[in-house]
Each structure stands twice: as structure tokens, then as C-alpha cells.
Amino acid sequence: MSWEVYNSDGQLLQATDLPDDAVTISKLSATGTASNSTFLRGDNTWAAPSGGPSQASQADIEAETNQDTYIPPDLIKNSPGVAKAWALTAANGTSNTVAYNMASLTDSGTGDRVYVFDVDFSSANYAASGNAFGPADNTIQTCIFGQNTQAAGSCDCLVRTESGNGNLDKENSAIFFGDQ
């Protein structure tokens, strides 16, 4: 059945010509019940919205499972592309206040630091990266991670001279990626 609507002058109105509120809910021939917790679907049925996606588990996030879930802020740290630990270390081997997931930092000698994590990695197979620099000469030195120890709960870092024949006490940064 089709309907035609005319204005007071007898002119046929187009749908775009209808004034606001010309069609009320009571004039709709929709099935279901209109309420503040339902919406009118395209098939002319009043329905409650679906529950939406569920929260992803840590295992789903780490495995990057393709599913209809969401990652809440407190679990985003489990995503493979997110740093699991990082720190900025002073030249004298002490930890600066800029750090994440670091239980402690040990100065094991000239240019030799051991980072101990608050939350261990699932294994010793994780990536470590960083650099060392000094405000006096602004040169960037090499940082060698895991040469002595790379365990699930800790990793060492050696800050080497440009020639690689000795260690230096330089401010350095370290960042760690992997599964925890």
C-alpha cells in the first residue's frame, strides 16, 4: 500500500518536504515495543541493542586473535607491539625516575648494568634495545644487551666505546619487547 501526503494547498508533498515531527511513533506500523531501551531496525522492528563485543583475554591479545573483542586499558600492555619494560639510566648506573616495569637496576661495574623486571617475561626470548649518550660529547655509544645474562626476569646491558674495546659509564636508555 502506498500513501500520498498533501499540504493544505492541495500540493503533493515529497518525503523531504515533511515538517519535523509529522510522523509520530504511534503512526509507525512497526512490530515490537518502542521504549528507551529499544531502537527501530531497518526491517521496521523495535529491538534491544546487542550486548556488543566481549573483553579479550591476555592469551587472545598476545596471540593477536582476530575476533569480536575489545582490549581494555589495563590489558593493552599484553599486546606484542607494546613495550613491556623500559628505563632511563644515569651515567653513574643509578635508575632515573623514568622507568616502567623495573624492580631494580644493578651497577655491576663500568658501563655494565643489570635490569631486573617487576613482571618477568614468559621466557628469555624477548627483544632488548637502547642507546647510550653523554651530554659532554653528545656521541652515541653501542649498548649490548644480554651478553652476560638474558633471563626471563632480568637482562644485562654493556655500554661499549666506539671502538668496542671497553665499557663506558654513560647515560643510557633501554626498552624491552616480548611476551610476559
Image: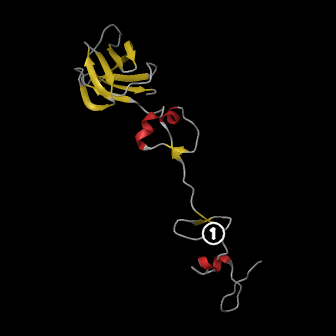
List x then y, in percent, for residue 14: 69, 79
List x then y, in percent, for residue 35: 54, 70
Tell me the quadrant of the picture where the N terminus can be found: bottom right
Horizontally, residue 38 falls left or right of residue 13, namely left
User: Please, what secondary structure does the residue beneath circle 1 have?
Assistant: loop
List x then y, in percent, for residue 157: 34, 17
Give residue 69's quadrant in the image: top right
Horizontally, residue 148 falls left or right of residue 13, namely left
Colouring rule applied to residues: secondary structure
In depth, the one of 115 and 38 nearer the eye is: 38
Outermost front residue: 32
12 over 96 or under it: above or below? below
Q: In the rendered structure, which amino acid carries the disc numbered 1? A: Gly
Q: Residue at image x 50%, y 36%?
A: 61
Give residue 168's quadrant in the image: top left
Q: Residue at image x 54%, y 34%?
A: 64
Outermost top residue: 165
Mark 1 lies on residue: 32
Outermost bottom residue: 9
List x then y, in percent, for residue 26: 61, 79
Tell me the quadrant of the picture where the C terminus can be found: top left
Q: Residue at image x 25%, y 26%?
A: 95
Q: Residue at image x 66%, y 70%?
A: 31
